[in-house]
Amino acid sequence: MRNKETQTPVTKKFEFGAFVSLCNIYDTYEVDYAIQKAEKDKELREKMAAHMGKKKTKPRKKIHIEHDEIEYELLKVSKIVEKIISLNDTDAIAQDFRYYEDPSDQFRDRGEGTLMLMWTMIYEKEKKLIVTDIAWSPDYFDMFGITLSIPQSELTFTDNPDIGNVCLWVLKNSSYPDYVAHTQSGAMCLSFHPDFGNILAVGLRDGNLGVYNVSLLKNEPEYSTSLSGTKLMSSVTQVVWCKNLPTGELNFYSVSEDGVVCQWILMQSELMKVLRMSLVIDMYPEIELGGIKQTYYARGTTITFNPADPEVYLVGTVEGYIFKCNTEWTRYVQRFKAHEMPVNRIDFNKFDPNIYLTCSEDFVVKLWEDKSQAPLIIFDLQTGLTDLRWSPFSSSVFGITTVDCRVIFYDLDISTKKSVCDQLIHPTEKYRLVRLAFDKRVPMIVVGSSRCTVVTYKLSPNLRTIMKSPKKGVQIPTETLELEKLHTVLNSIRE
């Protein structure tokens, strides 16, 4: 029998020494917090792994499920048949789009080209609406989305209800949209997610935002600020998706006329709003109410992220200011007066992210270099400008839309004073051009205008000429050659 001293196992003994300080205690808590956060993020990702359209609903009867499946299959088949019929009707246009090249380009001056009319789309049910924004699908080269809204002038002095639509068009069927969603207010802007082309963010005139899953049968948003009461105070002018959060959530930014830039995070069941920036400008004389100085907020019009640095973005305003901001800060990095009237578009060059263009209703286009408050060159077009885009094919080509229904192309490598293409799109008495968008995969542009009209054009060979490496010798990538061409042009401008 063992005595009490030997009934338990022998306890191992060892010496341990450590220096205890506030730093050590803080680091220990930080490590423990990081472990707990990683576990919570893992659980959140597992919950969000389910389809974003699947929500907790009461189980339906079997007959309803069968009806939905039959309706979906019937709609799918009818769309295919409609596309086949439309393709037969527009076969000549499809053949021109695929094979025809304008032979007159070889007889024109160097760089001059034309736009060849392709498909024209009109949403007949809402011909009084105007096209407010256009975006090409990242998944399909022949699909693009548009937003429609009643003109602001018709709402100010009339009792017309504010309505809008989100439409997806495909080139296979130019007679009717492939997808239509009606909005509770005028639809002002949209943006496809670059990785998930079926997810579409839309901003409305009343300050609400919605996220649609266009692959589903229903035409209602999966996420909406109208349900959570987090809408903005004024019209949303642009939305743009940005890189996913470290925890995996999708998110996008919005700019609105109430002078704020907000980040919207897609949580499991709602849109979470995060205020990122207030567009404050100085006013002289200062405004005072009751002896209290009032802050003046600039009305945002456009927002764009730097393609090389996803944390940096630029915001244009109605007052003509441009704000350079960072997603990590709540105060702007730089602010300068770029135009005398509203800035309608800011677009970074597709080959050099340090170069960007701006256009305004003050008749001018300005070419800027990052970190500079003075433009490198100014283009005076003697008419109001509504949109502007760099070409994805050439580093020196960009297109502009004007209020008098013209589309103008400039090639900096050819001339900084004379355009290489100036083409009338619609009669100026009845129409007004609003938006322009390049297809990144095929040589085509789409132009949106009033009267719910969208027109597609094919670029002639001179408007999409790219630099090619010589057949003999070292092969240099096209991107490098285009970048060298742009830098050569910019150096000549600086001199």
Image: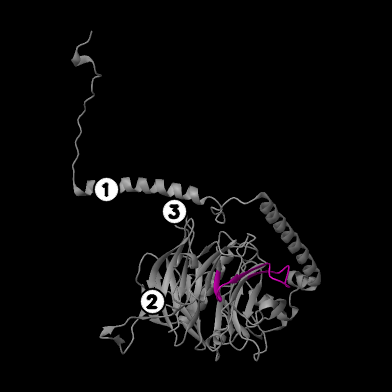
Front position in the image: 279 or 142: 279
Which colour scheme appears in the figure?
one colour
Stretch in magenta: 167-190
Q: Where is residue 232 in the image (x, y as percent from the top left)?
A: 44, 72
Q: In this view, does 196 lie to the left or right of 444?
A: left
Helix, strand or loop for disc 1 = helix
**Label 3, on which residue?**
247
Query: Is 420 inside the magenta-drawn segment?
Result: no
Amino acid on which disc 3 is placed: Thr
Q: Can you give x and y, in whole percent of width and height, for residue 452 in the image?
A: 65, 79
The residue identified by callout 2 is: 279
Q: Earlier in the sequence, mark 1 or mark 2?
A: 1
Label 2: few (<14), some (14–19) or many (≥20) C-alpha neighbours in 10 Å: many
Residue drawn at (46%, 77%) of the image: 234
Which label belongs to residue 27? Answer: 1
Is disc 3 surrounded by few (<14), some (14 to 19) or many (20+) residues within 10 Å? few
Residue 320: x %, y % from top left: 44, 84
